[in-house]
Image (cartoon, rainbow, N blue to C red):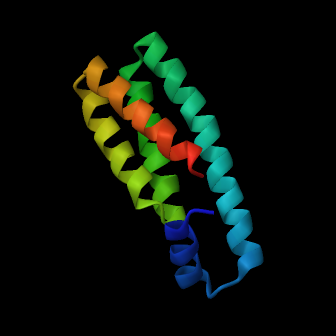
Amino acid sequence: MKECCRKYLCEQLGNDMEVINVIYAEYVSSIDDKMAEADAAVAAGAWDTLDKVAHTIKGNALTAGDQQMADVAIALRGVAKQQDRGGVDRLVADMKALAAQL
């Protein structure tokens, strides 16, 4: 478990590790699912879909206390709205690197 997430969730949930572990596992699973959706949206050039996926990732990351992932998702929303393929490719790669740390 990423330290930032453990710390945030402990602060929010009073060190209930059973609940924290469930929430974190759901977060990791959601990121895996959303990264697949992001890849499909990028491949299809579906900018609106990519924006929505990034929005969901941001929310899930903030719920788990993963500010780094949330920041990348926020940036991804911006480049998706601009239809900036180079920016999208860079940020999706950054997001995948962060997801690998989960």
Whether residue 92 sits left or right of residue 32 in the image: it is left
Number of numbered discs overlaid on the protein picture = 0
- Above or below, 51 against 18 in this view is above
Residue at x-position 71% and y-position 83%: 16
Judge left or right: residue 94 versus residue 86: right
Q: Quadrant of the N terminus?
A: bottom right
Residue 75 vs 10, above or below: the answer is above
Toward the bottom, the furthest residue is 14
Rendered location of residue 5, percent (x, y): 54, 67
Residue 79 at x, y percent in the picture: 26, 30
Q: Compared with residue 33, is residue 48 higher up or lower down, i.e. above or below?
A: above
Residue drawn 39% across the image and 55% down it = 68
**Residue at left offset 65%, top offset 61%:** 24
Q: Residue furthest right?
A: 18
Q: Nearer the viewer, residue 79 or 86?
A: 86
Horizontal relation, residue 36 to residue 57: left or right: right
In this view of the protein, which residue sits in the foreground, 46 or 91?
A: 91
Instruction: Please give the name of the residue rendered at 62% of the width and 54% of the height, measured from the top-left corner.
Output: 27
Q: Position of residue 64 (x, y in %)?
A: 54, 63
Which residue extends farthest left? 82
